[in-house]
Amino acid sequence: MLHAIKNLGILKLIEEFPEEFDFNALDTTDYFLKQREKAISKGKYAKLQFEILKDDNIGIFSINKGKVIFEVERISDDSWKYLFLKTAPRGAYITPTWKENPKKENKKLEYTVENIIEQSKEDKSNWLLDLVTIYTAKDIECGEIDENGGLRKLSFYDTVKWAKENKNLKVFSVKFDGKYNSEMQAILNLALESKKQIYQTEQAKSFSSPEINCSLCNENQELFPNVLSGVGINIANVDKSGFFPGVDSENATKAFPICAPCAETLYVAKFHAFPILTQKISGHRVLIIPHLVESKDKVEGLDILKNSFERINLNGAKQTERYILKDLSENKGIATVTFLIGEVEGQSVNNIRKVIPGILPSRLSEISESIEVVNNIHNDLVDIHPWKLNKLNLDSKLEIISDIFGPPKYLKEKSVGRKKFKSYSVDTLQLLNSILLSRKYPLKHIITEFSSKLSYDFLGSLSEFSDKKPMRSIQDNISKMMHLLLFLERLDVIEMNSGTNFISKYLEKHDGLKPLNDFFTKEANGINTKEKQFAFLVGLLFGKLVSFQMARGVSTNALKWLKGLQLNSQDLMEIFIKTKSKLDDYSTPKSAWSNEMRGVAEAIAALGADISDWNISRKEIPYYLCLGQSLSNYYLPSKNGENKQNIQKDGE
């Protein structure tokens, strides 16, 4: 894992500094160290060793003709030039660039000023003396008029406070004779050397030992025990199985001492590669870490970074997320991929919840192909097909999983309106694990949890005082579910047995039911028992009744029979009986029954009589019932035999 992260950092160095670094840096430590020294001597190396400032503006202190002045300038893309670096809360800033909290006093700044003043008593460098002049100034010009009509002049600390309150500034720095920190060689050298402070703590200092080498490069040099935390890879739960096996959180930093050059590559990876490789997949924040192949082909490993950089912000959208799995699968320089799932956002890596290692590019290729196939199947559906969605969220982000099972249960929702459904039985992390590693996932668990989703959304839609909402809720959910099941089946994550068409002899009697008969014979994978087919057909006929009521503009009181989709086998039979009775009521003076509807009713009655011992749980019934309901207008043509092209979807 750490070696892969280190290589990401080196790849970024090669991409950023092609004249100083080449792919030999990936081969041996000697090459890397020589190329590193070359980049340092040219003043380029620091560009990737300091944090990117994302604020719009920065407050700048400088000395002009003996006067200390304060100005606000726009932060440009090369914000590394300010040499900002986070340090320990009780430490000092290593350069004269710092961040402020609008609501708190900055004790760290006060400590830094005190240190600089003490240091200047021994070191009389011009830049250091200028810095003391700024820090101790009492009459700094802010470029604005005060209440008396004169130039506003404040002390250093009052200027910072004023800028926070009146200019909404959070970042401050200093210029020396018009030069930024990075342009001052003394400050640049000091910053690179002082950066080692973030790799150690008061309790865990750096050390050298002839018996202990760097955990990454195996070189014997000064080692730092707090590198992971120092570079910001804050994996607080490192004792979780699969990340650092055999290491508990108390001893994790001791077990992986790392030298400064290797720490710098981890820093580059974390701040400059991680944001590109951080995606939201199935509702989870994921850091994707490619592991490079050990061959000449690894030069193509740089493609994943280049492609990602090019695709970000195209037309204002992160196109990378849609294609990242395909990009990874086609990259010849990648051997395997690791998914790190947790509180991963941009440059932040915390509280890792799951690690999925050893994902093969060939598997990612299978996933990408399955995404394409299922999308093509969806696009090929006729426009009036009930499962044709306005948008199918099936791409590399796999949003379709969170569409169905809700956001991760560990995420806190804002308490506005009705909460979204959250799955507690289907572990979407484990489902993602099965997809990526080609593992089986129990279909029954998926079906039963989806039934809970159907019930939850159905009950919520009833409160919206619209007859169309409940039916639209069922149809949309079923549409998404059918495409997800097709996707999972293609990937061999679930098995959906085709079973036997138990009702063929009843459907064959009616030409209008041939499409339905073909559906049961060729397409109805998973509807493989008499009980499931019974529930499906009841839903089919029931859906026709509700559509009939909606067309007549009468009350859709039949929805009450569904009992919020908390149903057992007895409820199913009662729904069938009530549906038949209500259709009979509507048959005066003109019959509401078509020949096809009578054929379905006959098949339901025959199936029901043939089932002696019901083998379907109440947690499965809603799915199969709603599956039939969603297709009612598609497979049951109107009584006068209108072509399906004139049939409208339920709820439109």
Image: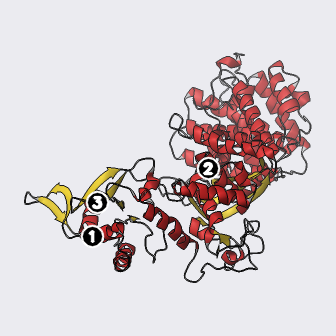
Name the residue located 42 percent from the left edge and 66 percent from the top edge: 95
Place of residue 546 in the rendered image (x, y in percent of width and height, measured from the top left): 64, 34
Q: Position of residue 341 (x, y in %)?
A: 66, 58
Q: Secondary structure at mark 1?
A: helix
The reply to whether residue 174 is in sight is yes
Q: Are marks 1 and 2 in contact (CB under 8 Å)?
A: no
Kindly indicate whether the residue at mark 1 contacts the one at mark 3 (C-beta within 8 angstroms).
Answer: no
Mark 3 or 2: the one toward you? 2
The residue where tag 3 is placed is 62
**Residue at 74% from the left image edge and 69% from the top image edge:** 244
* Corner quadrant of residue 355: bottom right
Q: Residue furthest left?
A: 148
Residue at x 70% of width, y 40% of height: 327
Q: Is residue 434 left or right of residue 100?
A: right
Residue type at mark 1 is: Thr
Residue at label 2?
20
The x, y position of residue 477, in whole percent, is 66, 41
**Residue 561, position in %: x, y?**
66, 45
| 91 and 464: which is toward the camera | 91
Three-letter residue code for mark 2: Glu
Residue hosting label 1: 133
Q: Where is 301 relative to 164, above or below?
A: above
Q: Quadrant of residue 253?
A: bottom right
Q: Can residue 577 be spotted in the picture?
A: no
User: What scheme was used to colour the molecule?
Assistant: secondary structure
Q: Residues within 10 Å of mark 2 (few under 14, many from 20)?
A: some
> Gap between marks 1 and 2, in whole Å?
38 Å
- Rendered-image quadrant of the N terminus: bottom right
**Helix, strand or loop status at disc 2:** loop
Instruction: Name the residue nearer the viewer: 260 or 553.
Output: 260
Please state which amino acid type lies under the numbered disc 3: Ser
